Image (spheres, grey):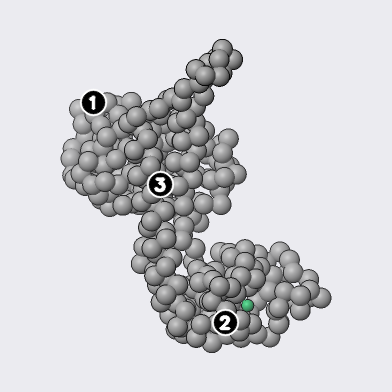
């Protein structure tokens, strides 16, 4: 199962009424931007979060995969779009209390991918239509939806009598939330297990930097993180390095990185006189395989903190 975020704006009501999302296939110049082409990736059972005017207002489940379909008659007034399009039928579950993206942006920001992020750094939604939503972001969104829409205690009831406190159960929403969260967590867990199993032998079961070989202290560290990787990249054992907890944390935070030759680079955030304390040596070089190169370069370019 995959998750998506759709930016709907003024077409939300029309599309909700029809139980669909729809996009043109091509712009006036005959090009198909990524956010329209992505419509063709939607399969039955996939989840879509609906973003309208700074809020997540609904979550839906695709009842079938994407198909080609002309512009629905109710949307004919949108003249700037060509008639040929992509359509997905969905079951909408509108939220009683929408999730404001700006109010929750500090929780959302670390989970946004570098490429194809639905939201900008200033918290606004991006132009375009359908964006990917990685599993970590989906889990966060359903958590925020749950906080506002499930198990809410009515303040008035609380004041009148504690015995009368009832939880507000939105019965159609609960299973959608529960399944979305559980499927996303399972996908991450199984992916991490396979990644670790395949990666450990490539590094002879020890930290590439300090040689610690106690399995409990070893982490299979992604070079290109889960949120930024395709499904294939997430499981590719070359997209990572085996490190002890300490070095994994430094790598994950971009305080150390490796170049295409496997040479260690240490961020200037760490002072020279502290290298020993962190178990780092300026001249370290690790043995890498050709498959590692592209991922190490990506990490150095995108995660490494240079100031
Ligand atoms: Zn280490």
For ligand 1, tell me if the residue under mark 1 lies within 8 Å. no
Q: Residue 181: which numbered mark, if any?
A: 3
User: Looking at the image, do the residues carrying marks 2 and 3 touch, with CB atoms under 8 Å apart?
Assistant: no
The residue at the point 36 percent across, 67 percent down is 232
- How many residues crowd around disc 1 within 10 Å: few (fewer than 14), some, or many (20 or more)? few
Q: Label 2, secondary structure: give it.
A: loop
The label number, if any, that marks residue 74 in the structure image: 1
Instruction: List x then y, in percent, for residue 6.
Output: 37, 40
Identify the residue at horizontal 48%, vertical 41% (top origin).
Answer: 143
- Asked whether disc 1 touches disc 2, contact meaning CB atoms under 8 Å apart, the reply is no
Q: Secondary structure at mark 1?
A: helix
Number of callouts in the render?
3
Which residue, given by chain and number where applicable, does mark 2 sit on? 213
What crowding class fits label 2: few (fewer than 14 Cα within 10 Å), some (14-19), or many (20 or more)? some
Pointer 2 or 3: first along the chain? 3
Q: Quadrant of residue 68?
A: top left
Query: Looking at the image, is 295 positioned above or below residue 92?
Result: below
Q: CA distance from mark 2 to mark 3?
A: 34 Å
Tell me if mark 3 has few (under 14), some (14-19) or many (20+) residues whose alpha carbon lies within 10 angstroms of its own: some
């Amino acid at each position: 199962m995959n998750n998506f975020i759709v930016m709907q704006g003024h077409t939300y009501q029309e599309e909700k009424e029809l139980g669909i999302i729809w996009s043109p296939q091509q712009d006036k110049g005959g090009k198909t931007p990524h956010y329209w082409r992505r419509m063709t990736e939607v399969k039955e059972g996939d989840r879509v979060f609906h973003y309208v005017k700074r809020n997540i207002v609904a979550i839906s489940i695709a009842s079938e995969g994407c198909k080609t379909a002309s512009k629905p008659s109710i949307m004919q007034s949108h003249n700037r779009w060509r008639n040929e399009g992509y359509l997905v039928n969905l079951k909408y579950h509108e939220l009683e209390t929408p999730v404001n993206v700006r109010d929750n942006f500090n929780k959302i920001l670390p989970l946004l991918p570098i490429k194809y992020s639905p939201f900008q750094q200033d918290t606004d939604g991006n132009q375009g239509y359908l964006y990917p939503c990685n599993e970590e972001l989906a889990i966060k969104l359903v958590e925020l939806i749950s906080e506002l829409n499930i198990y809410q205690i009515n303040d008035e009831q609380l004041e009148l009598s504690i015995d009368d406190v009832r939880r507000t159960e939105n019965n159609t929403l609960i299973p959608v939330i529960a399944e979305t969260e559980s499927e996303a967590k399972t996908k991450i867990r199984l992916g991490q297990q396979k990644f670790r199993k395949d990666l450990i032998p490539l590094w002879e079961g020890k930290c590439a930097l300090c040689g610690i070989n106690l399995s409990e202290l070893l982490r299979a560290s992604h070079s290109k993180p889960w949120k930024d990787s395709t499904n294939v990249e997430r499981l590719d054992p070359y997209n990572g390095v085996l490190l002890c907890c300490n070095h994994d944390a430094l790598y994950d935070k971009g305080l150390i990185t490796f170049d295409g030759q496997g040479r260690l680079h240490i961020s200037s955030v760490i002072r020279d006189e502290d290298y020993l304390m962190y178990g780092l040596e300026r001249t370290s070089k690790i043995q890498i395989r050709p498959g590692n190169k592209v991922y190490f370069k990506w990490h150095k370019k995108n995660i490494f903190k240079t100031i």
